[in-house]
Image (spheres, helix red, strand yellow):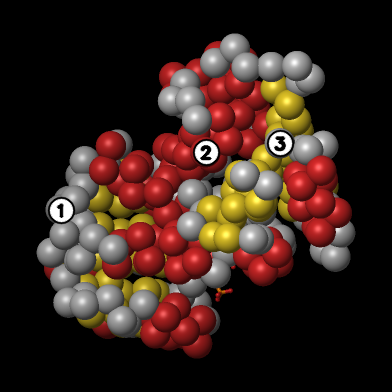
Amino acid sequence: MNTRTYAVIGWPLGHSLSPIIQQAAFDAAQLDATYVAIPTPPGHEQRRFDEVRKGDLSGLNVTIPHKNPAFHAMDFLTEAASSLGAVNTIIYENGKLKGDNTDLQGFLDSLQTFGKFDPVGTNAVVLGAGGAARAVVHALATCQPESVLVANRTLRRAQELATSVTEIRGTTIQASTLDTDQLEAQLSKSTLLVNTTSVGMAGGPEPDKSPVNPSWLHKNLLVFDIVYRPTTTPLLHAAKSTGAKTLGGLEMLVLQGAASFKQWTGENPPLDAMFSAGWAAVSSNQPTGAP
Ligand code: ATR
């Protein structure tokens, strides 16, 4: 049997960690497969989808800016992809292209397994309103928290995201900017704070800053920063010094990748090998990049 080829497509792809983590998984599972990064400019993604149909590629991860075009190009979608309007994993199933979004599962699995956190009935704050925030807010909303405040530099984007999930029964979802009394008040009663902005990310716009006023943090919080490089961001550093519990972004990255691996192969993902490869890569000095 021929070696199977899987790939991540995006533009720009930078130093994506997915090839390192997925290749470690295929090797540990002793599957005859390679996983490559294919930088794909906007407008050229359809060619990649066709390659999956033809069998030249066995499956894809999709990242910015192709998550939405992929959503429109699939034959069918999972519930997660359909609720987010974005696809990050393409599976070829019974002659059809299936689009999934494993960000949602990756977030919930890491929150529960590594954060030991159950969102039911809790108050939470999500910083940011981009694609990652969308996955986080939709994931939280499925767990029936009491309230979620989406706080973002650009209020309009936070409002749009909050409005997109208000149909969830029993949860209040509100929006604010990053410097309001409303955010301070919500944080004081919250037990979960999730950062999805690129503030604090190595190579990002403000690598030395916390996205939120550090004096608003407290010891009853789980602070989850989905940024994975550096492993301790300025936000996590500030959180640790208040005695809050912390969780970095590598767990979510590996677990969303593990969910893709499971869909493509049907096998249980070799998590130890995936984490070892991921930790080694984030501890190296490479600049950051796409998932
Ligand atoms: P992704 O899809 O990865 O979430 P994105 O859509 O580019 O990426 O979103 C990046 C997030 O980081 C946004 O919430 C952005 O805020 P805006 O909506 O106001 O652009 C936030 N962000 C980026 N740079 C920021 C900065 N310097 N200060 C505060 N927030 C910032």
Question: Disc 1 beta carbon < 8 A from ligand 1?
Answer: no
- Residue 123, given in percent of the width and then of the height, sits at 19, 67
Residue 119, compared with residue 261, is above or below; it is: below
Quick check: can you spot residue 92? Answer: yes
Q: In the image, is 275 to the left or to the right of 172? A: right
Residue 190 occupies quadrant:
bottom left
Q: Tell me whether circle 1 and circle 3 mark residues in contact (CB < 8 Å).
A: no
- Residue 212, given in percent of the width and then of the height, sits at 39, 65
Element carrying mark 1? loop
Residue 78, compared with residue 146, is above or below; it is: above
Tell me the number on the disc at residue 220.
Answer: 1
Residue type of the residue flagged with mark 3: Ser
Tell me the number on the disc at residue 263.
Answer: 2
Mark 3 crowdedness (10 Å alpha carbons): few <14, some 14-19, many ≥20: many
Q: In the image, is 95 to the left or to the right of 159? A: right
- Residue 60, given in percent of the width and then of the height, sits at 68, 44
Which residue, given by chain and number where applicable, does mark 3 sit on? Answer: 58
Element carrying mark 2? helix
The mark nearer the N terminus, 1 or 2, is 1
Residue type of the residue flagged with mark 2: Gln
